[in-house]
Amino acid sequence: MTNVEIRSATEADLPAITEIYEHAVLTGTATFELIPPDLAEMTRRFESLIEGAYPYLVASLEGRAVGYAYAGPYRPRPAYRFTVEDSVYLQPAIHRRGIGTQLLQRLIAECEARGYRQMIAVIGDSANAGSIGVHSRTGFAMIGTHSDVGFKFGRWLDTVMMQRALGEGATTLPETP
């Protein structure tokens, strides 16, 4: 594994995060967005997650953000309030160096510390072996595939659904406010 600093993201990281995500939108199938959001939109999304007290992390090598991960609400209805959905993106040059696994492990720990009980991964493209592998290595189980639900780059794409219990999962009742 690569020795990388994993820390909370700041607004100063957003230009690098925007660049990483732009590449993913324009060249990959991990996201089903077709037009990359600009820095203003990425800032709005970041602020919304931070205001909601969700973790947003960055992986830094030599002081430069090379990857990021965050958790956000799985669904807006209140019954889902103990379930989060994760996202992890990396610069292409640092794939297969263990950084995605490190980011996801830290994200899991941060979500557990906040009292979340389930994490859902919605993985774009059933051929996305890298993301499926990272999620499998960090304890996620396959829960299903939505076939042919996205259309990008002239072809139909699946989404793979994976899930992992956080903390005590569903073995105990959560503390409710």
Image (cartoon, rainbow, N blue to C red):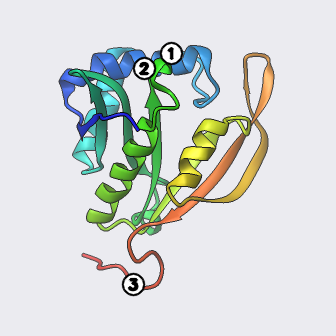
Residue 173 - label: 3
Most foreground residue, 175 or 23 = 23
The 10 Å Cα crowd at callout 1, few under 14, some 14 to 19, many 20 or more, is some
In the image, 36: left or right of 40? right
Mark closest to the chain's N terminus, 3 or 1: 1
Marks 2 and 3 close (CB-CB < 8 Å): no
Coordinates of residue 138 in the picture (x, y in percent): 49, 55
At label 3, the amino acid type is: Leu
Residue 155 - label: none
Coordinates of residue 12 in the picture (x, y in percent): 19, 22
The alpha-carbon separation of the residues under discs 2 and 1 comes to 5 Å
At label 1, the amino acid type is: His
Residue under numbered circle 1: 23
Residue under numbered circle 2: 20
Please give the name of the residue rendered at 54% of the width and 53% of the height, measured from the top-left corner. Answer: 137
Please give the name of the residue rendered at 46% of the width and 60% of the height, measured from the top-left corner. Answer: 77
